[in-house]
Amino acid sequence: MQLKNLLPKFLQKREQQTDLTGSNNMFGTIAGNGMLSRFFPAGIDFIPGDSNGKTISLTGDGVDVGPRWIGLANHEMQFWAYNYCPPLATVIDRLAECDSNGVIAFVDKDKKVIKSVSKIPKLRRIKKLFGKPNPLQTRQEFNSQQLVYCKTFGYCPVWAIKPAGFENDFTKYLINLNPVFCKPVKNESYDIFADENSPNSNPILEWKLSIFGKTYTIPAKEIILIKDGYMNKIDDFGLPISKVAGLDYYVSNICAAMEADNVLLKKKGPLGVFSHDSKPDMAGMVPMTPGGQDDLQEQLRRYGLTLGQLQYVVSKYPVKWNAMSFNLRDLMTKETVKQGVDGICDRMGYPAELMAGKNATYDNKDSVEKQLYQNNIIPFSLRRMEVYDIFFGLSDDEYNIIMDYSHLVILKEDVTKASQAREAYSNSIQIDWEGGRISYNEARELQGLEPRAEYNEVYYPEYIKLHPEMALTGKQEGATKKTKYDRKITKKDASKDTPTKK
């Protein structure tokens, strides 16, 4: 029997023994054959088939069996993308770790950090709450988990548990809720013109939390909603779309490329074909029986490139080896993964230069990390802390919550430069003030200080008349150092009238 007649039967037999449905999952075979198949059918792909929402779904026999679109706009698929796509999880985790470097602090209305928080009962309670949000998590764990939920799902509901009848600053516990298990219930009476304190002002009536087969109902007023995205969903809940949505192709390509590399390393595909030798023996050409085929296939399993396998074939059959070659670089799996990683970094606002460290150099690494904090970490922390301000009633008060990153070495250099720049700026104001070019209040306004009515339209010579001792010491308000001009000024000179007043 010729080889071309044997191969179809052999392949048909092998196809019946191999489950190929999972191979068409957007996360690869490991996802289709694993936990994900419990929630979604494994034979699902996301490749568009037309402009009407139809997609191509491939199964083992190549038959389209009613495709569906299940992409990364779905919370469950976002959850599995975080689990099955290592570069996506890496970017999100690194953002969380960078954010957790911040320290909770409080500032007054002038944005100055409050040192004596313990003397203010309300702030003392809030600081204690953030220090230990709940019995199961530390501050760092709670903070990092919250950011991971926000980056993965677009938002994070935080359950604030407090005694009944108490103000929000008496909250006892803060618990991050996973959006996969916590679903919002639409407020059918929602009115966009409703009063802020009205229950109809919130598009979400309540939240349904399902854990271990139990469902808990949480009023919307007990939920602190931390958002990351900007574009709202179509369901009018006021919930943002996750930044992971839209990364379908990047995530799927990365998973497919990694699976292809794994298969090539473990199986390498067919290296060649065993066929009957074209030169028959005395008995003539005898076709290989089905039992012989299975025996040969079983023997071939012993050979490979791992330490426990053999490298040379010794066969009792008169077979001929026909080598097959394949250029592995034609698949361009490494380039595909890199393109996907760059796309994920762009979407999540994480510098691609910091991934794997190959694109970053010693000279530009510091600037890239500063850019990460300036353009991503700090802006998100400001938005997040503002939500907490509103919940704890600090937005209309004289205090605010912030995440302070000034202690980080990577940012201290900028603080030093800013201090030097401020000193130079103050010196320039001092020179103009002492030279009589600006008034006392103008000098204060340039330094960001409130003007003083008693010194309205007062210039330096007139100020010296009021405070002659300043001419000798150079300690007038706003001075940074004593200049040559100060040392030349005397009480006699200060008593002379000058036409500098406007």
Image (cartoon, rainbow, N blue to C red):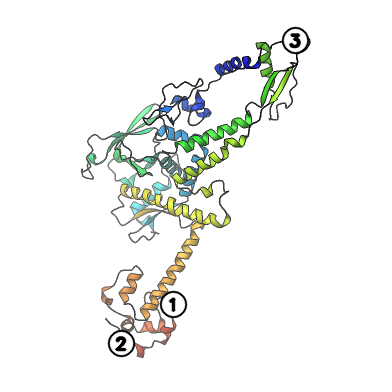
Q: Which residue is at 55% across, 41% downward?
A: 335
Task: Judge from the rendering whether residue 142 lies leftward or rightward of residue 461; answer left or right.
Answer: right
In the rendered structure, are the residues bearing label 1 and label 2 in contact, judged by CB atoms less than 8 Å apart?
Answer: no
Image quarter hosting the C terminus: bottom left
Choose between 88 and 148: the one closer to the eye: 88
What's the distance in space between the residues labelled 1 and 2, CA to CA?
A: 24 Å
Question: Could you tell me the amino acid type at mark 2?
Answer: Thr
Check disc 2 and report its element: helix, strand or loop: loop
| Residue 66 location (% of width, % of height) | 41, 22
Question: Could you tell me the amino acid type at mark 1?
Answer: Lys
Residue situated furthest right in the rendering:
282
In the rendered structure, are the residues bearing label 1 and label 3 in contact, judged by CB atoms less than 8 Å apart?
Answer: no
| Residue 36 location (% of width, % of height) | 47, 28
Reading the image, the residue beneath label 2 is 498
Question: Could you tell me the amino acid type at mark 3?
Answer: Gly
Q: Nearer the viewer, mark 1 or mark 2?
A: 2
**In which quadrant of the rendered view does residue 306 lie?**
top right
Disc 1: CA contacts within 10 A as few (<14), some (14-19) or many (>=20): few
Disc 3: CA contacts within 10 A as few (<14), some (14-19) or many (>=20): few
Mark 3 / mark 2, whichever is N-terminal: 3
Check disc 3 and report its element: helix, strand or loop: loop
Task: Judge from the rendering whether residue 243 lies leftward or rightward of residue 265; answer left or right.
Answer: left
Choose between 275 and 352: the one closer to the eye: 275
Reading the image, the residue beneath label 3 is 284
| Residue 357 location (% of width, % of height) | 57, 48
Q: Which residue is at 50% across, 61% downward?
A: 413
Reading the image, the residue beneath label 1 is 481
What's the distance in space between the residues labelled 1 and 3, CA to CA?
A: 110 Å
